[in-house]
Image (tube, rainbow, N blue to C red):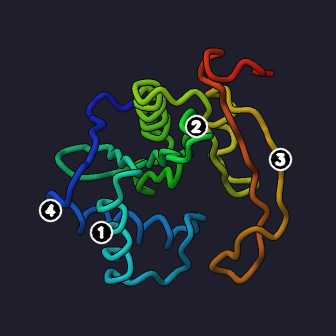
Amino acid sequence: MNSHVKVEQIKTNTGRINELSELLIKVVEHGASVGFLSPLSNFEASKYWEKVLNNEEILLFAAIKDNRIVGSVQLHLCTKQNGIHRAEIAKLMTHPNFQRSGIGRRLMENVEERAKQEERSLLMLDTREGDPSNRLYKSLGYELAGRIPNYAKSSNGEWDASIFYYKTMDDKHCPNKI
């Protein structure tokens, strides 16, 4: 694991929009399925991050190495009365130069810890079928919920399936844990 990387929550536009935009553009260029197609403009990426930072239902965490953002993940808190026990993990990204160094796992462990602090006992996420992230999520105890074919379009024009996962954090709010 990369011990020189720290994970911290980014709460406001602290001058890191450019770094976040660079990260998003780079992972999209390398084929990540995170809701955008390549080529992604800096303007579009910056606009996206501004929306994230202005949404109090989204908690953004960044992995920082040598004072540069090298990864990020989001925790989307459900605010519906019947869903305050759940959250969605979204847009786990690691800069291509830092992949396979434990940063994704570290981000996931941090976001799970924050979910517990927020009293969220059910976490959900989705990822493209066949991506390396599937192995990470399974190794962290996420259960397969299902597969939807032709869920998202890739930059190469093909339609990819998405795999949905969930994880129950405790039995307190999820007594029907499988």
Spatial CA span between label 1 and label 3: 32 Å
Image marks 1 and 3: residues in contact by CB distance under 8 Å: no
- Callout 4 secondary element: loop
37 shown above or below 174: below
- Eye-nearest disc, 2 or 4: 2
- Eye-nearest disc, 4 or 1: 1
Residue at the extreme front: 81
Q: Quadrant of residue 51?
A: bottom left
- Eye-nearest disc, 1 or 2: 2
Mark 1 burial class by Cα count in 10 Å: few <14, some 14-19, many 20+: few
Spatial CA span between label 2 and label 4: 30 Å
Say which quadrant the C terminus sits in: top right
Spatial CA span between label 3 and label 2: 18 Å
Spatial CA span between label 4 and label 1: 11 Å
- Callout 2 secondary element: strand
Q: Which mark is drawn over residue 64?
A: none
| Label 3 vs 2, first from the N-terminus | 2
Residue topped by disc 4: 15
Q: In the rendered view, does 123 fall on the left or right side of 48?
A: right
As rendered, which of 76 and 107 lies closer to the eye? 76
Residue topped by disc 3: 146
Q: Which mark is drawn over residue 50?
A: 1
Q: What residue type is disc 4 on?
A: Gly
Image location of residue 36, percent across then percent down: 53, 74
111 shown above or below 129: above
